[in-house]
Image (spheres, rainbow, N blue to C red):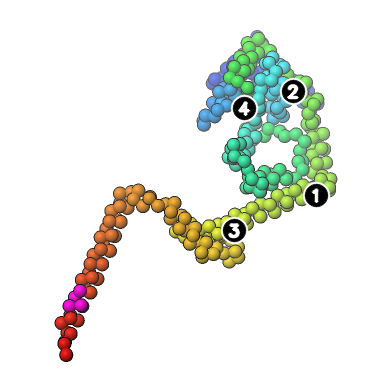
């Protein structure tokens, strides 16, 4: 009995796709690799989860070219159905960037915090590896153009197992990618010592972006020094007493802030009670003061003598 036929086609809801690993000079014996495929069901639902597949146990040398060739050519999925492929490490970076990026509907001003952050991230040193390997998690998410394409791809993976087909991993792709093995580390050694002009350009770009970030932070601190809060207090920021807010400007801004909050004094019931109590206390105080004045006037009139 064929050993491949004894391998289960599905485990815990994952379709087991059997791949053939080609022999290598360092390991000339062919080997099998198990790729597990299922629908993407993240803990936090996303708009694209319904049209995505989740892959587990991808080979360490997997690239977008490998995944696309596997599904479009070897599993015979129509071309142009795959929209995006994200590996485990890339998904974490993409999530962080998405939190920093503002919505497309808002125009970003030149010198804004988002532009400065993008410039600093873009001014990185030259890479020292010509090809990224999947060390983190060994999982990937394939996003398709629609839900129908997702179902077609999942059926194609199941059909390949049912027909006993075993696609060869990397077939027709490796020749178009940077090589692995000894050549990879030789290239890494070369990239570790980049050209001085290229290195200088990278450092200059970074320092320019860093200076822009420092200037942006200084402008932000200057605005804080000149804008009092609702109570008329000015935030104490780094920079000493340079460019302090004028008293007149602070009073005007404080009045404007009070005008904005006008009408909100009686928003809560206890505020209304406190105001009435304070008003009653003022009236009693005023009454006592007037009463004392009348008493003094009477005493003064009694002491007055006509000559």
Q: Distance between the residues labelled 1 and 3?
A: 33 Å
In the image shown, does 293 or 102 lie closer to the viewer? 293
Task: From the top left corner, tell me how far across and down residue 108 is, in percent.
Answer: 63, 43
Q: Which residue is drawn at 66% across and 51% down?
A: 213
Q: Distance between the residues labelled 1 and 4?
A: 38 Å
Q: Name the residue under label 2.
A: 170
Which badge, 2 or 1, comes first in the chain's sequence?
Answer: 2
Q: How far apart are marks 2 and 3 (CA)?
A: 57 Å
Up the image or down, 48 lies above or below 291; here it is above
Image quarter of residue 59: top right
As for residue 9 lying within the magenta part, the answer is no
Which badge, 1 or 3, comes first in the chain's sequence?
Answer: 1
Tag 1: Cα neighbours inside 10 Å, few (<14), some, or many (≥20)? few
Kindly give the residue lying farthest to the front in the view shown. Answer: 307
Magenta residues? 294-298
Secondary structure beneath disc 1?
helix
Which badge, 2 or 3, comes first in the chain's sequence?
Answer: 2
Q: Which mark is residue 200?
A: 1
Q: Which residue is drawn at 66% across and 27% down?
A: 84
Secondary structure beneath disc 3?
helix
Q: Mark 3 points at which residue?
A: 222
Tag 3: Cα neighbours inside 10 Å, few (<14), some, or many (≥20)? some
Which badge, 4 or 3, comes first in the chain's sequence?
Answer: 4
Which badge, 1 or 4, comes first in the chain's sequence?
Answer: 4
Task: From the top left corner, tell me how far across and down residue 103 is, in percent.
Answer: 59, 37
Q: Name the residue under label 4.
A: 141
Where's the C terminus, which quadrant?
A: bottom left
């Amino acid at each position: 009995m064929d050993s491949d036929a004894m391998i289960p086609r599905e485990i815990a809801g994952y379709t087991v796709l059997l791949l053939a690993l080609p022999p290598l000079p360092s390991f000339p014996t062919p080997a099998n690799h198990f790729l597990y495929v299922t629908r993407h069901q993240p803990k936090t639902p996303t708009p694209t989860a319904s049209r995505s597949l989740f892959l587990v146990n991808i080979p360490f040398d997997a690239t977008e070219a490998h995944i696309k060739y596997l599904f479009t050519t070897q599993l015979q999925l129509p071309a142009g159905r795959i929209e995006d492929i994200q590996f485990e490490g890339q998904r974490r970076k993409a999530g962080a960037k998405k939190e920093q990026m503002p919505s497309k509907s808002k125009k970003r001003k030149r010198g804004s915090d988002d532009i400065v952050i993008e410039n600093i991230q873009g001014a990185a040193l030259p890479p020292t590896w010509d090809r990224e390997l999947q060390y983190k998690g060994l999982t990937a998410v394939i996003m398709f153009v629609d839900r129908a394409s997702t179902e077609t791809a999942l059926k194609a993976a199941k059909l390949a197992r049912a027909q006993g087909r075993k696609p060869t991993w990397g077939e027709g792709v490796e020749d178009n990618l940077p090589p692995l093995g000894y050549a990879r580390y030789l290239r890494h050694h070369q990239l570790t010592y980049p050209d001085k002009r290229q290195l200088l350009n990278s450092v200059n770009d970074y320092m320019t972006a860093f200076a822009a970030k420092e200037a942006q932070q200084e402008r932000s601190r200057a605005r804080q020094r000149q804008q009092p809060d609702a109570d008329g207090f000015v935030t104490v920021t780094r920079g000493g007493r340079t460019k302090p807010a004028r008293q007149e400007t602070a009073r005007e801004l404080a009045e404007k802030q009070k005008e904005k909050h006008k009408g909100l004094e009686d928003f809560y019931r206890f505020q209304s009670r406190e105001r009435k109590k304070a008003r009653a206390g003022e009236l009693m105080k005023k009454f006592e003061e007037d009463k004392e004045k009348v008493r003094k006037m009477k005493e003064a009139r009694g002491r007055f003598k006509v000559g």
